[in-house]
Image (cartoon, rainbow, N blue to C red):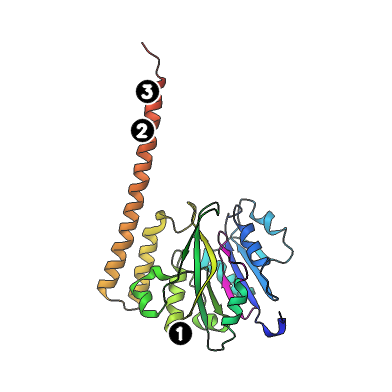
Amino acid sequence: MDKEDKPKLTIITPSYNQAAYIGQTIESVRTQDYPDVEHIIVDGGSSDDTVEILGRYEHLIWISEKDRGQADALNKGLALATGDIIGWINSDDYYEKDAFKTVADCFSDPSTMWIVGNLNYVDDHGSHTVPDKSPEVTYGRLLRNPDIVRQPPTFFRRSFLDRAGGWNAEFFMVMDFDLWVRLAKLSPPSMVDKNLAYFRLHSEQKSCFGNLQRQTRELRSILEREGASWGIVTRLCLKKEWYAFKGYCKMLLAFLHLLGIVQRRRFANRPSR
């Protein structure tokens, strides 16, 4: 592949205490058959083995220090980036093999400002995957359904990302949705019908049900900012509250089941009189 004909890619990875997965993330970038890639990892001061793992890779650009959250880390990475095309992959997700070739081909069209590909959901151990075709993204569709955001298979032209203002550090849960809305107001993305990334499902991720209430508050503020109708705002907030309620019910049922097992075992182990 002729390096001079290809745009430089910068991959930004925000990280915090993901030592169990970050090696696979790094390898999925390092092993791409693409001539010009820089990988920037912005770690929030992890207390696990993350920093030790980062130190094993000479090609990485990385920092480890406390930050104000994921959006702040992404903006730090963007300030260090020198690539023409920006990708954002979290430290528990990873890229498809040879995905960067597809990305570069898409951006050979100068009118392409950002792209959204497909992804695969993968379980904690990487043994089971479920393919997911990304829904078409437009400004109007985003306001009607924020859940169409697919972050791992999305790439941005650097100049376009700068024009939109980067990530808003005021948002903890929905910084991706907020950015997508601002980008889509300027130009819709090109949809790419190829798998570009893998999104890992596990109990410690931010998108677990414990953060759904905060997510709902942040979504409401963005929708109201964008002038979404009362009906849309109410419907989406009720939907998120329903998800949160189901999550709490599952947790309660699991706790009661566990409590029942413990009580039965204690009863069975009581000495007879």
Q: Position of residue 109 (x, y in %)?
A: 56, 87
Of 255 and 47, nearer the camera is 255
Q: For residue 68, which numbered disc appears in the image?
A: none
> Residue 57 lies in what quarter of the image?
bottom right
Read off the magenta span: 82-98
Amino acid type, callout 3: Phe
| Residue 3 drawn in magenta | no
Q: Position of residue 163 (x, y in %)?
A: 52, 84
**Earlier residue among tags 1 and 2:** 1
Contact between marks 1 and 3 (CB within 8 A): the answer is no
| Distance from Cα at disc 1 to Cα at disc 2 | 55 Å
| Distance from Cα at disc 1 to Cα at disc 3 | 65 Å
Characterize the magenta stretch by its predominant secondary structure: loop
Q: Which residue is mark 1?
A: 187
Q: For residue 267, which numbered disc appears in the image?
A: 3
**Earlier residue among tags 1 and 3:** 1
Up the image or down, 219 lies above or below 109; here it is above
Q: Quadrant of the C terminus?
A: top left
